[in-house]
Amino acid sequence: MSENTLPPAPVQDENQLILERREKLKAIRQQQAEGKGVAFPNDFKPSDHAASLFERFNGQSTEELATLGATAKVAGRMMLKRVMGKASFCTLQDASFGDTGGRIQIYVKGEDVGAELYASFKHWDLGDIVAAEGTVFKTKTGELSLHATSIRLLTKSLRPMPDKFHGMADQETKYRQRYVDLMTDVQARQRFMARSKAVSALREFMVAHDFLEVETPMLHPIPGGANAKPFKTHHNALDQEMFLRIAPELYLKRLIVGGFERVFEINRSYRNEGISVRHNPEFTMMEFYAAYWNYQDLMDYTEALIRDAAMKAVGTLQLTYGGKPVDLEAPFERLTIVEAIVKYTEAGENVTNREWLTNALQKLGMKEEKNKLSTRTLASLQVLYFEEVVEEKLWNPTFIMEHPTEISPLARANDDRPEVTERFELYITGREFGNGFSELNDAEDQAARFHAQVAAKDSGDDEAMHFDHDFVRALEYGMPPTGGCGIGIDRLMMLLTDSAGIRDVILFPALRREV
């Protein structure tokens, strides 16, 4: 049976359909009151899934299956149904995948399941959760199926599913009602299965390299660890303002001070900023810190980490994103900001020319009033130009290194060129995927940089950091040389699943309240 052979269902009023289904449930409840079964039974335990049945039996002939007489117990959501007098077909969908997307056809015959039950079956609806036991066989058309010896209604669905030919057309509805999206779109289910595998792979890789998984607070008395605008809340018992974490960095580095040499956290962080294809106010990162590592060590490790996650999640290092190939197998390129500007633009020697960079930025639409170009350092102008012109051109994995000290308040400055830091950002498909650096472990230098951040905040920079006295105190006890990195899990999942927007890889993304 193919769904393409079925005519589209006539358009019906959804409220009327819901009303009809509620009446059916009312009748089932009445039967329960009369001692004729349970409305929502919970005693069925499926022993088989569609994918495993197809893997075991689909290669066998009709005759071989008839001789074998293999039995199975399955359960799932009824996605298709065809009633034909004394015998009918329905298709159940479970959590497995395989070639059928977790679907298997059930053959239901009145004389096998009983006339009364068969009569009830005819009134079951698409979307109902159904259990079936029976014998594995193949139909005349060669489709592996289950010849039911018993069939049960486990859960009555009160809402009709979207039209089977068109699914959920509205993208926002797919995000808001992810449960419907998952039951009707096998690709959506596969996408989130790949995400789960990738996160598990990241965790396994970290543990295998002697990193200790830890948990740090999500409620912070002082927001820190990143330049970002936090969400504010109030703790009643402590009677103080608190902030949802924007990054776990400062707490993880406190653990390095305490004596753990390698720590990581797969964490949820929150930033009260814009929503876009790359940004969700609630997102997932992994941050890790290793004593006696520097930013070069981090780049080597991050490269290996991403390859391992890709292989375990999707089974290949040759990806496609938006129709273009992405090569994770070749060595990741490493360029300084200046080298990247020279390679990808016409700047040439002008990369060190303040006047030329200022004019170029003005041509790109930047204004003195808003962007304060005249007061920026050369390094800051280079970063602006890089972000505006170069970022989007970094398609294959590229580490961009040596960010200015003034915009890297937690990173160690280069010993030979203190105006830049031992820092990198990883770019793939024109987007930032990770940020890492040799950590600043000079307590006095850290205090001075916090003071500079406070001054910036006083001047109107909402994303500038607060002064964290306790973190400075921790550094005063002494932190060994350390390297640390943060990787955006959601963006990585966009890459691995070829998803255009971040909301496609977050099960329940932030949306405006439904009215």
Image: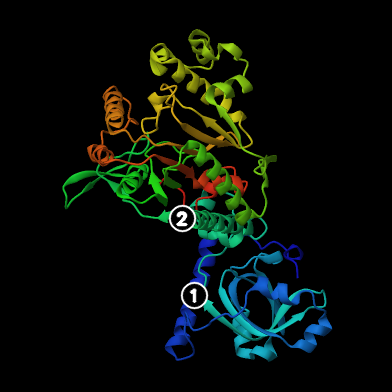
Q: In this view, does 66 lie to the left or right of 371?
A: right
Residue carrying label 1: 23
- Residue drawn where x is 52% and y is 70% of the image: 157
Judged left or right of residue 389, residue 288 is: left
Could you say which is closer to the camera, residue 442 or residue 248?
442
Q: How crowded is mark 2: few (under 14 residues within 10 Å), some or many (20 or more)?
A: few
What's under tag 1, amino acid-wise? Glu
- Numbered label attached to residue 195: none
Q: Mark 2 — residue?
A: 210
Residue 459: x and y in percent read 29, 22
Q: Residue at x 66, y 48 (%)?
A: 317
Q: Which of marks 2 and 1 is nearer the N terminus?
A: 1
**Which of the two marks, 2 or 1, is nearer to us in this view?**
2
* Secondary-structure class at tag 1: helix
Q: What colour scheme does the image use? A: rainbow
Amino acid carrying label 2: it is Asp
User: Eyeballing the image, is 99 above or below 498?
Assistant: below
Indicate the secondary structure of the residue bearing disc 2.
loop
Q: In which quarter of the image is the N terminus?
A: bottom right
Q: Is residue 398 above or below residue 130?
A: above
Q: Quadrant of residue 52?
A: bottom right
Where is residue 180? Give x, y as percent: 54, 59
